[in-house]
Image (spheres, rainbow, N blue to C red):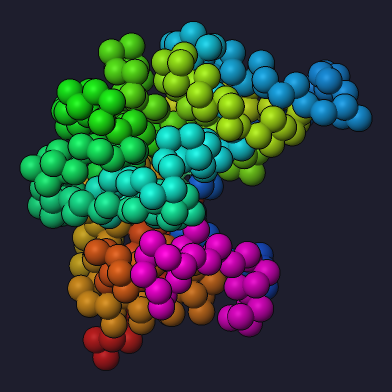
């Protein structure tokens, strides 16, 4: 999802154009388009023929089992909690939507440290809630949450959106800081917000907030199979929280937003997490290679533990110019609109060596043209 270039980030959104639309716009073939903007895995998804082997249960003429037991049990075993502490949805985005519907009333307030994943703003404004943004510390401080600014905003807020590791900076959201937010929220009792920790990129991180679930009834951790599991098209995500919180979310969860096939594939993938860990290791190596090459070219990326890199191009004009050059070569990157503190930056998803080299080539040509 991308912010419209002409409107405040919290108000108007456009969904990313598809490959055929972009190809038509730039006179290219759809197969020439490379998505460096979506933070998906360029590595092949696990072997679907194996995952879909065996009869569908229930058969496809019937609706899916709306409790998705295969996914719930596999996710619970993977993260080490009881199945009653897991809720499954159609991607992390639907899970975040169910959280917003459950805990963020119209007229309520959601606190969000920015820059971060823009969907939190979309969901909060869709609920007619106020989006209370708190600027993170600068790049030199690892884009850390500024607790001095954030803590006073917790009183009376309904939801806090945290992202660990944080998209789009690629930086970790330190467990220590997350714990401090949870402590401060807990101290407020009924006036305190629910704390959502979006761990979409968990497999790239050495830390997770899941063990904190037992201590904090107001904590909800969100996960997905879209990133390290290389299954973005399957659309499965899940929330992990204490049972009463899951029960509240269940009341507003759509009953059948995941197909029987998606549930089967996601269940099989979650039962084989080593595959995701291997993907994360491989992509982390490729990220370090790409970051080193970018640095040599004079485009240093901020330190990232994820499968994407954030790069400053110095000025808005330069960022727009390079975006245009990349698009003409079929390379789509994540850009940041006028209201975003990261205006003048681009975010690159780490892809395969061949594809990353294509990105570097086009950047090199653009740079040579600017210097000429
Ligand atoms: N959270 C974050 C931080 C993300 O970057 C993304 C994907 N861009 C999502 C959630 C959505 O993931 P899913 O594909 O599971 O809906």
Within the magenta stretch, is there residue 78?
no
User: Residue 243, position in %: x, y?
Assistant: 46, 14
User: Residue 92, position in %: x, y?
Assistant: 51, 38
Which residue is depicted at the point 53% across and 66% down?
14
**Marker count (numbered):** 0
User: Residue 218, position in %: x, y?
Assistant: 33, 24
Q: In the picture provided, is 338 more to the left or to the right than 57?
A: left
Which residue is depicted at the point 24% across and 23% down?
189
Name above or below for residue 290 compared with residue 202.
below
Q: Quadrant of residue 145?
A: top left
Task: Between residue 154 and residue 23, name the one nearer to us.
Answer: 154
User: Residue 85, position in %: x, y?
Assistant: 48, 15
Q: In which quarter of the image is residue 4?
A: bottom left
Which residue is depicted at the point 33% across and 38% down?
158
Which residue is depicted at the point 60% across and 73% down?
22
Extreme-right residue of the structure: 61
Q: What stretch is highlighted in magenta?
A: 1-28
């Amino acid at each position: 999802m991308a912010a419209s270039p002409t409107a405040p980030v919290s108000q108007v959104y456009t969904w990313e154009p598809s490959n055929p639309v972009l190809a038509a716009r730039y006179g290219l073939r759809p197969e020439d388009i490379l998505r460096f903007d979506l933070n998906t895995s360029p590595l092949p998804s696990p072997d679907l023929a194996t995952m879909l082997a065996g009869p569908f249960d229930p058969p496809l003429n019937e609706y899916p089992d709306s409790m998705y037991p295969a996914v719930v049990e596999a996710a619970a075993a993977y993260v080490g909690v009881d199945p009653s502490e897991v809720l499954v949805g159609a991607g992390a985005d639907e899970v975040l939507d169910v959280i917003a519907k459950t805990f963020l009333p119209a007229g309520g307030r959601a606190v969000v440290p920015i820059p971060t994943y823009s969907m939190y703003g979309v969901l909060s404004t869709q609920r007619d809630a106020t989006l209370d943004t708190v600027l993170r510390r600068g790049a030199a401080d690892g884009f850390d949450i500024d607790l001095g600014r954030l803590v006073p905003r917790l009183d009376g807020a309904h939801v806090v959106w945290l992202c660990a590791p944080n998209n789009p900076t690629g930086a970790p959201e330190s467990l220590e800081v997350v714990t401090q937010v949870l402590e401060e929220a807990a101290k407020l009792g009924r006036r305190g917000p629910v704390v959502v920790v979006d761990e979409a990129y968990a497999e790239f991180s050495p830390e997770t907030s899941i063990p904190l679930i037992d201590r904090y009834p107001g904590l909800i951790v969100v996960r997905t199979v879209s990133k390290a599991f290389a299954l973005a098209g399957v659309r499965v995500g899940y929330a992990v929280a204490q049972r009463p919180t899951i029960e509240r979310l269940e009341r507003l969860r759509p009953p059948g937003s995941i197909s029987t096939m998606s549930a089967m594939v996601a269940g099989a993938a979650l039962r084989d997490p080593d595959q995701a860990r291997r993907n994360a290791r491989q992509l982390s190596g490729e990220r370090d290679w790409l970051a080193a090459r970018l640095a040599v070219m004079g485009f240093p990326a901020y330190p990232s533990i994820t499968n994407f890199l954030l790069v400053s191009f110095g000025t808005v004009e330069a960022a727009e110019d390079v975006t245009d050059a990349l698009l003409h070569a079929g390379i789509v990157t994540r850009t940041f609109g006028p209201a975003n503190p990261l205006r003048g930056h681009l975010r690159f998803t780490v892809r395969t060596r061949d594809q990353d080299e294509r990105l570097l080539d086009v950047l090199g040509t653009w740079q040579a043209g600017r210097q000429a």
